[in-house]
Image (cartoon, helix red, strand yellow):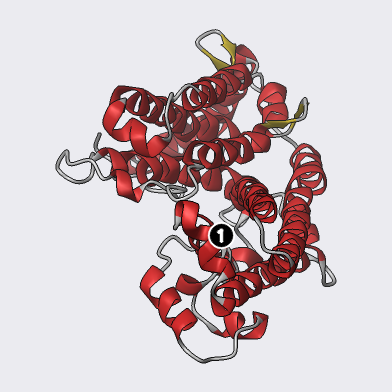
């Protein structure tokens, strides 16, 4: 006959054993009730491998080709300065800038680890120091540019020399051999940086492209986790840095249209739309689904419809609103701020959709933290 203590211990053990059986059974029954599926390692790896081969690496290669053309246009312009060659160089700069904005979606891994992005598209370009270089007697070539800091090179430094002086840009460049030499050296160095990025992803054994494709788990370093967090982070960056700061939402309501990206070239809206296109390609590109394919396999829903369709609709709305900004973004900040605020609101909704629904459905770990209180 059991003592009272033995009887109590027995009951605890029995209850624990029952829970050990019942809880998994309840979970299994719940899963059957919802019909929710689980992604296999093969599902995740196939998607990431396809995205890497068909979207990520081609995006960097497209940027490299664009810088090839820009450097060639720079040689042509330096050899035969004229309005037609200047306009050609400006057009090639815009193509290179747009292609980078798309590719920059994937500026993680070696691009981040080796600080390659700073030499390509650094925000804080220092115009006065560029003028000091031009006024100095230092020999100017690609190696010289390579030795300088990020604030003196890259796409925004080239934009400054090509567009800043408006109608006098041609005469200013033509009359200053050192200004022309610096412009040519900048385009050559940009081409060098673009090749470094492609090599960083494709060279080596294994290459980073292979390493990334094989990171098929669910931990912080998994490809799926990196992609989702990168997408959320960059949408927040576009929403905040490209829109909220110039609108004055981070400056006590005082607009700062002078902080618009692409202001000198009047390309702010085009660059922003290119960024959105790069982000959208993570989910779907050229009619082929990537992250959206996983969401569809899971049967993920949003308001009674496929979550993938909701994501596509949010991207479409944001792009349409960006395209509909009547003037250049700098002018729209002061003349049509409501249209810019609508775009901001749409991007915020998209960000929340990704942070809540996509993160939960894919079971990834969100590492990005948004302190935005608006």
**Secondary-structure class at tag 1:** helix
Q: Does residue 13 appear left or right of residue 106 in this picture? A: left
In this view of the protein, which residue sits in the foreground, 204 or 185? 185
Percent position of residue 253, x then y: 16, 38
Residue 122: in sight, yes or no? yes
Residue at left offset 64%, top offset 75%: 185
Which quadrant: the N terminus?
top left
Residue at left offset 52%, top offset 46%: 229
Q: Residue furthest left?
A: 252
Residue at left offset 56%, top offset 59%: 170
Quick check: 171 above or below 182? above
In this view of the protein, which residue sits in the foreground, 37 or 48? 48
Q: Does residue 304 appear left or right of residue 68 in this picture? A: left
Residue 364: in sight, yes or no? no
When asked about the image quadrant of residue 48, the answer is top right
Label 1: which residue?
Answer: 170
Quick check: 36 above or below 248? above
Q: Does residue 126 appear left or right of residue 64 in this picture? A: left
Quick check: 57 above or below 349? below
Residue at left offset 54%, top offset 31%: 358
In this view of the protein, which residue sits in the foreground, 126 or 216? 126
Q: Label 1: how many residues lie within 10 Å, few (<14), some (14-19) or many (20+)?
A: many
Which quadrant: the C terminus?
top left
Q: Residue furthest top?
A: 304
Percent position of residue 53, x then y: 82, 48
Percent position of residue 366, x then y: 47, 45
Quick check: 3 above or below 116? above
Percent position of residue 317, x then y: 51, 20
């Amino acid at each position: 006959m059991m003592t009272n203590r033995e009887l109590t211990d027995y009951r605890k053990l029995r209850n624990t054993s029952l829970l050990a059986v019942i809880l998994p059974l309840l979970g299994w029954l719940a899963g059957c009730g919802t019909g929710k599926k689980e992604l296999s390692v093969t599902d995740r790896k196939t998607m990431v491998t396809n995205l890497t081969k068909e979207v990520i690496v081609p995006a960097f290669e497209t940027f490299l080709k664009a810088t090839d053309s820009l450097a060639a246009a720079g040689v042509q312009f330096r050899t035969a300065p004229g309005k037609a060659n200047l306009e050609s160089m400006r057009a090639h700069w815009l193509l290179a800038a747009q292609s980078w904005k798309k590719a920059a979606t994937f500026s993680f891994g070696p691009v981040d680890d080796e600080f390659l992005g700073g030499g390509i598209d650094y925000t804080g370009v220092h115009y006065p120091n560029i003028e000091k270089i031009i006024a100095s007697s230092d020999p100017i070539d690609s190696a010289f540019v390579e030795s300088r800091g990020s604030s003196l090179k890259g796409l925004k430094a080239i934009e400054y020399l090509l567009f800043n002086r408006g109608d006098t840009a041609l005469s200013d460049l033509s009359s200053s051999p050192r200004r022309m030499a610096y412009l040519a050296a900048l385009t050559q160095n940009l081409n060098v940086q673009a090749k470094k990025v492609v090599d960083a992803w494709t060279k080596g054994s294994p290459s980073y492209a292979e390493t990334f494709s094989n990171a098929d788990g669910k931990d912080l370093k998994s490809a799926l986790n990196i992609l989702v967090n990168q997408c959320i982070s960059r949408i927040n960056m576009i929403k905040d840095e490209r829109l909220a700061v110039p609108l004055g939402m981070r400056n006590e309501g005082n607009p700062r249209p002078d902080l618009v990206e692409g202001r000198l070239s009047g390309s702010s809206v085009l660059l922003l739309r290119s960024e959105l296109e790069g982000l959208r390609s993570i989910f779907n590109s050229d009619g082929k689904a990537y992250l959206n394919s996983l969401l569809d396999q899971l049967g993920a829903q949003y308001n009674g419809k496929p979550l993938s369709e909701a994501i596509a609709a949010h991207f479409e709305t944001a792009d349409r609103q960006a395209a509909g900004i009547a003037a250049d973004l700098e002018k729209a900040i002061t003349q049509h701020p409501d249209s810019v605020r609508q775009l901001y609101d749409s991007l915020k909704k998209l960000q929340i959709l990704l942070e809540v629904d996509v993160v939960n459905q894919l079971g990834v770990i969100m590492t990005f933290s948004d302190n935005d209180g608006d």
